[in-house]
Image (cartoon, rainbow, N blue to C red):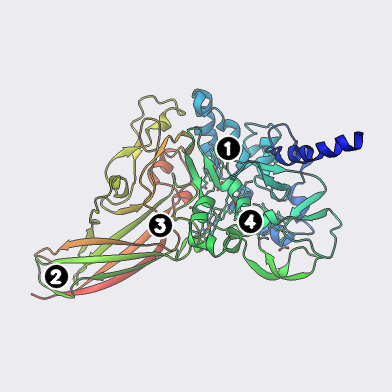
Amino acid sequence: MLKKLLHSLLPFFIFFVTIIPQEATKIGDFTYDDFEKPEYCGTSCHTDFYQQWKQAMMSQAYTHHWDEIEYFKLAVPHAERDEKVAEVKEGCNGCHTPIAYISGDNPPPFPSENSRANESVSCDVCHTITGFAGDIPYNFNYIMSPGKTKYSSRKGDIDSPAHQIVRSEFHKTTEFCGICHNEKSPYDIWVKSTQLEWKEGPYAEENVRCQDCHMTKAETKSATMGITYPDTKLHLFHGAHDPGKVKGTIEVRIHPDIREVEPGDVVKLTVALFNQKTGHKFPTGSVEDRIVWLHVEAEDSEGNTYHLPVDKKGFEGEEYTIAADVLAYQDMGVPLDMPDFKGVQRDAIPFGNRIFRMPYFDPQGRMTIQQWNTASLGVDYRFGPRETKIETFTFNLPYEIAEGKVKVTATINYQKLVTSVGKFLEVPDEEMEVIKVGEHSTEFTVFY
Ligand code: HEC
Ligand code: HEC
Ligand code: HEC
Ligand code: HEC
């Protein structure tokens, strides 16, 4: 009888067990002591991975100058002043220093105090993740299981003396990265969507994952006493802070519509820009900070130069994609306690240049670099993966242009942070470095 009853209840039992959603790891679930220090993993065993990680942004996500400035100068004071964004005081750390976040160390000590928060996104953050809560990976919805068992995509034949390994298919997926590379603001707006962009693009169809470009495979060892695998996943995590990774992302070709002209003629120049390199949009990630622009300049045979403004296309929101003399980012006045803050230059590059960006707007509709204060998004004029964009330039040749060859050069540049914002917040110049992504020149000849 009892057996029968149990049997009839079994399906319900299984049903309940399988539908109980797993919750994301949250503040208070674990403490610093539950996690290994990266030095422990990297000093004698995973020496190469450790050194690779050390020089990637992953190991500096909490300590890096611009991160420290944005968190302590803007985000924390903003969270204290505006109830709507109060959650970011803790939330930033959920991705930038997950162990501090979970330990309830929010805000953590300053980087100069050398606390364990400085470990940032450490080995044991990623290798204790077993999945994510819900349907979409975003806003640090990781599920973690710290301890002597490490989760990774390979379980070799040799056992590690330091820990057990459980083979995790999850580490091979892009969803794993999406946990931190997709972000929604307190206003429910996608302010980071690298993994979602990838999912919509051509690389997803071909199963070329984040790991294939940022953790490339090579024939080497993954641990000093381990064996050599043909496809060991390097821990390079190279991105915007590696000029070599950024260079060549966009290929540039420029041509005139006519090769032989007279002063006063009109030459139309066409630029084709091909995103050959990124698996997501370009720029991606911290889109609110990044600026990518096309600069076209002609030089006549006597060395006179003419800067050419881009031809307007007429789409909605285009004004945000052409460099202009306007102020923006007024909402920095809230955390900085400058109620009448007028803002700084929006673009800080030569006026008339085409900008490839997606503007983020604060609740008052002004452009913002505070992604947590983003209430809406503007036109998305970035490069999709493998997309080619066309831009045209109309050159009304001046009557004084010199006879002979005119060389026209199209340059596409990238900057991690708009110069005016960086200067205003006293961010070190390296963050505002201009990286030349691509360049091409063409010629036509002026006859008198
Ligand atoms: C086909 C190769 C490729 C794939 C696939 C790819 N990336 Fe990238 N990624 C690049 C290149 C090239 C850059 C450098 C240009 C740039 O900054 O966008 C880059 C840049 C980045 C950056 C820095 C962006 C910035 O502006 O700060 C991040 C973060 C990043 N990738 C994460 C990811 C994640 C997460 C995935 C998977 C969802 C992924 N990438 C998939 C090639 C790739
Ligand atoms: C941002 C997350 C992240 C961090 C930080 C990280 N790893 Fe990994 N690691 C991964 C992923 C994802 C894989 C599997 C990639 C795949 O299979 O495509 C991996 C694979 C590995 C592997 C197996 C490599 C192979 O090919 O067999 C080892 C060993 C490893 N990691 C050790 C470390 C150590 C040590 C550190 C710290 C120095 C570290 N990881 C930091 C995400 C991370
Ligand atoms: C636990 C959160 C977390 C996970 C999981 C994670 N990342 Fe990141 N990643 C970050 C943070 C935070 C940064 C930003 C560091 C900074 O600039 O402050 C970052 C930076 C990067 C960068 C460097 C961008 C630059 O500016 O140079 C790349 C590339 C990158 N991640 C790729 C990946 C890939 C690929 C995966 C999946 C295998 C992954 N990340 C998983 C949190 C994470
Ligand atoms: C959902 C995870 C997540 C949250 C939450 C998050 N970040 Fe990030 N943050 C990232 C990732 C991933 C990157 C790297 C993107 C890229 O390279 O473009 C990044 C990049 C940055 C950068 C740019 C780093 C650079 O050197 O260019 C700054 C600054 C930053 N975050 C600060 C913050 C602050 C402040 C908060 C809280 C208001 C915050 N982040 C919340 C994941 C997150």
Indicate the position of residue 366 as horizontal and vertical percent values: 35, 35
Cα distance in 3D space between marks 1 and 2: 56 Å
Residue identifier under label 1: 92
Q: Which of 370 and 386 lies nearest the eye of the viewer?
A: 386
Q: Amino acid at mark 3?
A: Phe
Amino acid type of the residue that numbered disc 1 sits on in the rendered structure: Cys
Residue type of the residue flagged with mark 2: Ala
The residue nearer to you, when weighing 191 against 9, is 9
For marks 1 and 2, the one nearer the N-term is 1
With 217 as the anchor, is 443 left or right in this view? left
SS under mark 4: loop
Secondary structure beneath label 2: loop
Q: CA distance from mark 3 to mark 2?
A: 36 Å
Question: Is 410 situated left or right of 244 in this image?
Answer: left
Q: Quadrant of ligand 2?
A: bottom right
Is tag 3's residue or tag 1's residue first in the polypeptide sequence?
Answer: 1
- The answer to whether residue 155 of the structure is visible from this angle is yes
Asked if the residue at label 1 sits under 8 Å from ligand 4, the reply is: yes
Viewer-side label of 3, 1: 3
**Spatial CA span between label 4 and label 1:** 23 Å
Which mark identifies residue 383? 3
Q: Quadrant of residue 104?
A: top right
4 and 3 marks in contact (CB < 8 Å)? no
Q: Residue 49: horizontal and vertical position, in percent?
A: 70, 59
Point out the tag, 4 or 3, that comes first from the N-terminus: 4
Mark number, residue 402: 2
Q: Which residue is mark 4?
A: 173
- The N terminus appears in which quarter of the rendering? top right
Residue 405 vs residue 434: left or right? Answer: left
Q: N-terminal of the two: label 3 or label 2? A: 3
Q: Is residue 1 above or below residue 302?
A: above
